[in-house]
Amino acid sequence: MPAATTTLRALAISVTALLTVTGCQTLDDAGRALGRSDLVNDVAARMDQAMELTYTAEYRLAGGEAASIAQEQKPARSAYTYPGGKLTVTKEATTECETAEGRPVCTVAAPPATGKPTVAVFTEAKRRGLVTPPVVVGLLTAAALEPAAVIEQSDTTLAGHHATCVAVSQVPDPFSACVTSAGVLGSFSGAVDGTTVELALTRYTTTVDQAAFEVPAGAGVVDRRPADS
């Protein structure tokens, strides 16, 4: 997924260029000391690589509700489901569905100019508890550029997969995020745009059910794409 990976890679490079190696240090797998910029760059690089994978990740949200992220490469497309809604992004369209009440309603808009989803398209998903990898990278980047922030690393296992965790404190909105060795978001806990978000990976597979990219059964569809799109 070229555009998405370029975005994440640019974020990682910008952090490395702007930060000095100060604050909390940890060790990488080879025992080398990692500074704040190295830590951010490592996590961003893992997420970057994951944007080129085909996978399905299922999550448990606060309160026990469920969400998921599914993406594949041929064709390149992704789907995000969350309580009361669903977002699908393909080269042809961005489709956002409201499923909370009564008959589902889906609004079809033009695809992102880059061909890949930007942080802006995840507004409703964030509001309903699903924070996505690009959003996490943005939060981590902003925290890493904050001189007062303390960024610490730890390791854990989520849904049977090893994960590297980053905890950010001494900022207005502290948060923690874990990323699996494959680069898939493993967990997140913190505030996003004023909303408290908690999610944890419950299942990860390298396959995708094609139904993930379909609109809900019986949904009403409103197509707002320009006539020539």
Image: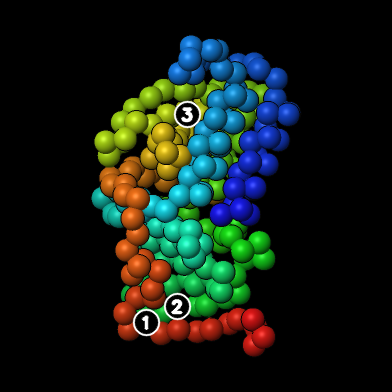
Instruction: Compute the Cα span from label 1 to label 3.
Output: 40 Å
Q: Which of marks 1 and 2 is nearer the N terminus?
A: 2
**Would you say the residues marked 1 and 3 are in contact, meaning their CB atoms lie under 8 Å apart?**
no
Q: In which quarter of the image is the N terminus?
A: bottom right
Residue 2 image point, x, y percent: 61, 53
Residue marked by disc 3: 166
Q: Number of labelled discs?
A: 3
Q: In which quarter of the image is residue 157?
A: top left
Residue 223 image point, x, y percent: 53, 84
What is the number of the mark on residue 106? Answer: 2
Is any atom of residue 98 visible in this view?
no
**Amino acid type for the residue under numbered disc 1:** Ala
Q: What element carries label 1?
A: loop
Residue marked by disc 1: 219
Residue at coordinates 32% horizontally, 84% vertically from top-left? 218
Q: Which of 7 and 154 is in front in this view?
A: 7
Near mark 2 (Cα within 10 A), the count class, few <14, some 14-19 or many ≥20, is many
**Would you say the residues marked 1 and 2 are in contact, meaning their CB atoms lie under 8 Å apart?**
yes
